[in-house]
Amino acid sequence: MTEPFRSFVIFAEMRTGSNLLEATLNALKGVTCFGEAFNPYMMGWPDKDELQGITRDQREADPMQLLTRLFDRPGHLPGFRYFHDHDPRVFDAIMHDRRCAKIILTRNPLDSYVSTCLARETNQWKLNETETPIPAAITYDGPEFRDMLAAVERFQLRVMHRLQVTGQAGFWLGYDDLRDTEVMTGLVHWLGRTDIARVEPARDQVPQNPRELADKVRNFDQMQEDLHKIDPFMLRRIPNFEPRRGPSVPSFTASEAGRGLLYMPVRCGPGPAIRDWMGRLGQTGTDFTQTTLRQWKRGHPGHRSFAVLRHPLHRAWTAFRQVLTQASPELRGLMRNVHRIALPSDEALKELPLDEQIPLFAQFLDFLRRNLNSQTTLPTHAGWASQSEVIAGFSRFATPDMLIREDRLIEEIEALTRAAGVADPQLHHLVPQPMPDFLHDKALIAAARGAYLRDYVAFGFQDP
C-alpha cells in the first residue's frame, strides 16, 4: 500500500509559473513551499541568507541538514522549488524519498526563454494587479536559446529516468494548468489533502507579458528562421529537445577545407586561436544541431574531427581569468561570500596586478577540487569540468578522430589536415599559447593535480 506523502518538490525552471504555483500552495493551511531553497545564489527567495535557522554557510557545508529541517514537520506538508542549476547534492535524496511527492512543471520553452530575457531586461520578475508592466522587447539569441533547451532537457530526462527506475509517478503540470481550479484541486488531492474541497489558484500575480510574441521579440523573423533548425513538433514534448546529454553540438565548428574538418571544443582551451585558423582555411559553419551536423557529416565523406586538450593547470587558469573578467557579478559574489575565494570588489578587479591574482587562483583551485567532487552548491561549469567528462559527453554524439595535446598542436594538426585532404593547412597562422611561466609553482601544480587527478590519469598529463 502506498504511504501518504509527507513532503513535495516542484521540479521547474525560470519563468514556468513556479511562483504562481507556490503562492497557490502557500495559501492552503498546513502546506508550505519554501521557495528555491537550494538555489546557490539565495536561500529560498532573493536577498535571504537564512532559511529555517540554517545559514548559507551551513547549507554550503552540508545541504542535507537544511533538507532535513524543511521536511521534518509532522502534520504539515512542506516542499520547495528545484531547478536544473540548483544544488546537485540533494537530488539523489529527493528522488529516493518515496514520501516526497514530485511535481513536474513545464512551459513552452520559447515562451520561457523570452519571458526570462524580458525579466532580466526590466528587472520585473513578478507582477500584481496594482503594478504596471514595464514595456520592453528582447533580441533572440539562437545559440543561447539552444543552450537553455539542452540544459533543461538533460535535467528533465534525469528526473524522468529516476522516476522510472524507482517506480514512482510524478504529477505533470503545464503552465496553462496553473489557473485551472479543477487541476489545482486535483493536485492537492493527489498530495493527500482530500480534506480541501476546492483550491482556487492564487490571484495576487498576473501575467506580465500577455502580448503576441512578435511584439516581444525585435528580430522575430530571424527567430522564426532559426527555429526551423529545431523540430517544432517537439515544442510541447517532455523532455523537449536534443541533445540529450552533454555533446555541446552547437559549439562545434566545421571547415569546408579539403574533405572537411570538425572542431569539437573543450571550453577554456585554445578555441579562439583554432577557430581563427579554420577561418583562414575557407568557409566555416557553426551553431549546429545534432540533425544539421549529421547532415554535414553525410555530405563530407572523409572528413576528420578533433578536440584539443590543454594542460589542466593552464586550463584552470583560463577558467579563473574568465570568472574574473567575463562571469556575472552574481557568480563572483558567490565565490567571495560562500566559496572562500577572497576576491576584491569588481571595480578593484579591473586593475588587480598579477602577483595578487596568484593567491586567489590557488583558492580557486581548492574550490575546483571541492566542486568536481560534488561538495559545493554550484553545478560544475563546462569551462572547468574535467576534460575526461567533456570528451565523454562528445562521445554520446560522436567521438573525435583525434585528441590533440596543445603542446603538440602543430605536429598533430598537420597529420590531421593531411588525412582530411587539406592542400594548404597554413599552419604558420596557428600559434599555440604556451603555459605562463608563473604557473610553474609547486603549490599550484599540486593543487591542480588534486582537482584534476582524473584528467592526469586519463590523458597522461605531466607536471609542468
Image: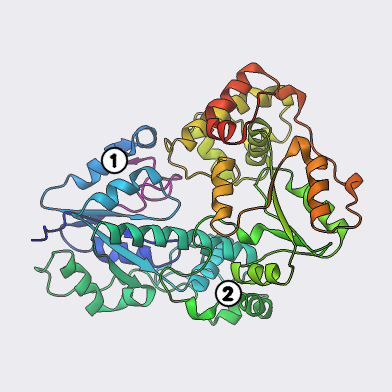
Residue for point 65% across, 46% down: 267
Amino acid bearing label 1: Leu
Classed neighbour count for the residue bearing mark 2: other residues with Cα under 10 Å, few (<14), some (14–19), many (≥20): some
Indicate which disc residue 66 carries.
Answer: 1
Q: What segment carries the magenta color?
A: 33-52
Residue 341 x %, y %: 54, 29
Q: In this rendering, would 343 be left or right of 6? A: right
Q: In this rendering, would 149 be left or right of 62? A: right
Looking at the rendered structure, the secondary structure element under dot 1 is: helix
Q: What residue sits right under mark 2 in the picture? A: 230
Indicate which disc residue 127 carries.
Answer: none
Classed neighbour count for the residue bearing mark 1: other residues with Cα under 10 Å, few (<14), some (14–19), many (≥20): many
Rendered-image quadrant of the N terminus: bottom left
Residue 254 located within the stretch drawn in magenta: no
Residue 34 x %, y %: 29, 52
Q: From this viewpoint, is residue 140 visible?
A: no
Q: From this viewpoint, is residue 237 visible?
A: yes
